[in-house]
Amino acid sequence: MAARTALVYDEEMTRYKLLWVDPACKVEVPERLTVSYAALKARGLAARCVALPVRGATDEDVLLVHSEEYLEAVKQTPHMDLEGLMKFTQQYGDVYFHPNIYHCATLAIGATLQLVDSVMTGKVRNGMALVRPPGHHSQRSAANGFCVFNNVAIAALYAKKHYDVKRVLIVDWDIHHGQGVQYCFEEDPSVLYFSWHRYEHQSFWPNLQESDYDTVGKGKGLGFNINLPWNKVGMNNSDYLSAFFHVLLPVAYEFSPDLVFVSAGFDSAIGDPEGHMCATPDVFAHLTHLLMSLAGGKLCAVLEGGYNLTSLPQSVCQTVQTLLGDPTPEMSGLDRPCLSALESIQNVRAAHHQYWSCFRHTAVVPVREPSTKRCRSEGGEDGGEKREEGEAEDKPEDLVWPEPLSRPAPAVRTAVAFLPGVRSSVPQGCQRLEETSPASAAISEELRDQLAKDVKDEKILQCLTNVLSLLDKVEKKEVRNGLAVVSDVSLAATFALRHALSSTAHRVLLVLVGDAEPPADSGDGRVFLVQFCSKEPEGQKSLYYLPVCLKKGPAGRCGFVHAVLGLVLPLAYQYSPGLVLVALAEGSGVDVAAWAQLTSLLQGVAQGRMLTLMQGCEEDTLRATAASLMGEPTSALGPTGTLIPEDARVLERERKRLQGRWGLLQTAVAAQDKN
Ligand code: X5A
Ligand code: ZN
């Protein structure tokens, strides 16, 4: 199947609006959809998607979540006059009705279900539904917060009913708490609901105690509801990415969903008059990318909120462009999350520590009281402090930020080079490196000069030539990434590093999996080395070095995944390399699926520029790696199982050692910052 992304949209959903004066609802305007769709067209993104028509929802679809009484009541609204509509509206909170909203609400469900159908039947890999009205606040018998029917909740139940979907993950990155979704799945362990939301100790709408981090689900559903309240406004890219690295992703991987929904509200973006947050539109490219390695890539994004008519379309474009597989934008300037964010992250991890093994072994600092029962002043922290509401000098609408850069993709995604003389079949769609191109001949000559003394072996020379040719193609943006099979991974990594630092990249992240000898430390911070190895090196360890020594075999696989999510990714993002080198040594014993996850996830940094070096690996490892470089869905890992205590200790020790320099590793408020 060619990689395909669906876009579901119908102009009809712009044909309702607020007919009276209501300050609480005035931001929810038809232009939200028109500007988003226009931006997708203007950037040529809509044309690259499979356009799916919407459909109407059946009563049966609606009744998956809502009561008959409520459905019947909403069905009357098209026949009401203005007065009747206003009266009907008054029973609910922060929502409005219009003669055409029932029709649009059924289309919003139908659009979402069309997306589910085409993802689940394999017609497309992923997609986005641009809908109005949004859904995540609506409840069994109530409209709420601009929402009439709960599009995503209905779609999750629909997917379970009509397809072989056992576990569903719903990621709600809208800035409001989707309490409607929470209520729907509170007792349901088959649907994991994650929501972050502006909360400010319950002073922000919808002002619910049950939006706090200590609401974790009920009965069989204990642990399957994850609330991350933001207690200050002004949260930024670092805060959002930390929440993904240290809360959502570890749980999501442990859960291993068959299908992922994103309640994609963009009121969490900068400039939004509701959210008052500071994350820039390009962060949504990364949030999307980080979710695309789950569920074999089956991801359905469904629009919820988003009220700034500049950041909304930009964020929608970033999301769709990532679903299409374009290189992720550079994220520089990441830092540790602010204290308030860290406290929320620490609290939610602690609240869930008995339900998820990824949190079980982290030191559980006594959970502070849920934030609603506490009133503390949080001013005065150094660096990245957020403003309290009220002290904001600027209205969010007046903020300016740079327009996201275009994200051009090299014509060829992946080039591969095998050992000389080996006729492995080139994975579909990859470019085979021509061993005799003029460029490689020149490189070969150069190498011969440089190496004549140390390297006599023709085979090694050919490998190094391949490596440098691939790097050259990456540098010239002819290809996005490359894969080379080499006979000596240490030597190849050393040469690749040296070459890359002299041309392609100012900083290189090298991830070495296995016990091969790493290249000598450059000592100037231009290389960050991560090594998965079986024995700890002795002596002083640099702040640009992360050794990960885990149990071998199946037991260590969980540790591997959690090391990638909780350590390697945050380090990679904050280090912000210009190139990622990933090297697999012979006999490393790494699990193929886990290794493929590593190469997929790390494509989020360095705009996807990656060179993979592999020594003596099996055919299936090679195939899985090439597929991951090509952007094909990494086969789902399956539930990761339990992180063993020894491995957890190793990971936490390294986190402690490095988190002072690399603040994105922090998962808890440092002792000296507590008050
Ligand atoms: C979908 C959404 C927000 C409602 C805010 C009401 N709803 N104050 O973003
Ligand atoms: Zn919202």
Image (cartoon, helix red, strand yellow):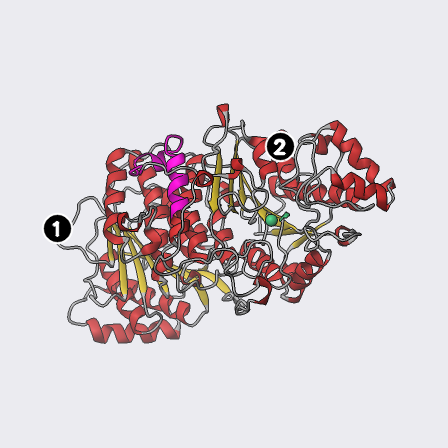
Check if residue 350 falls in the magenta segment.
Answer: yes
Horizontally, is 528 left or right of 610 in the view?
left
At a point 37% along the width and 74% down the height, the residue shown is: 439
Check if residue 321 falls in the magenta segment.
Answer: no
Q: Which mark is residue 113?
A: none
| Percent of width and height locating residue 174 | 57, 49
What's the residue type where badge 2 is placed?
Answer: Leu
At a point 37% along the width and 62% down the height, the residue shown is: 576
User: Would you identify the image quadrant in which residue 638 lies?
Assistant: top left
At a point 56% along the width and 32% down the height, the residue shown is: 165
* Residue 371 at least partly seen: yes
What's the residue type where badge 1 is placed?
Answer: Glu
Q: Which residue is mark 2?
A: 157
Q: Which residue is mark 1?
A: 538
Q: For the residue labelled by badge 2, is the local secondary structure a helix, a strand or a loop?
A: helix
Mark 2 surroundings: few (<14), some (14-19) or many (≥20) residues within 10 A? some
| Percent of width and height locating residue 204 | 55, 47
Q: Is 479 or 649 nearer to us in this picture?
A: 649
Q: Is 61 or 199 nearer to us in this picture?
A: 199
Determine whether 172 is above or below 222 in the image: below
Q: Which residues are magenta?
A: 343-365
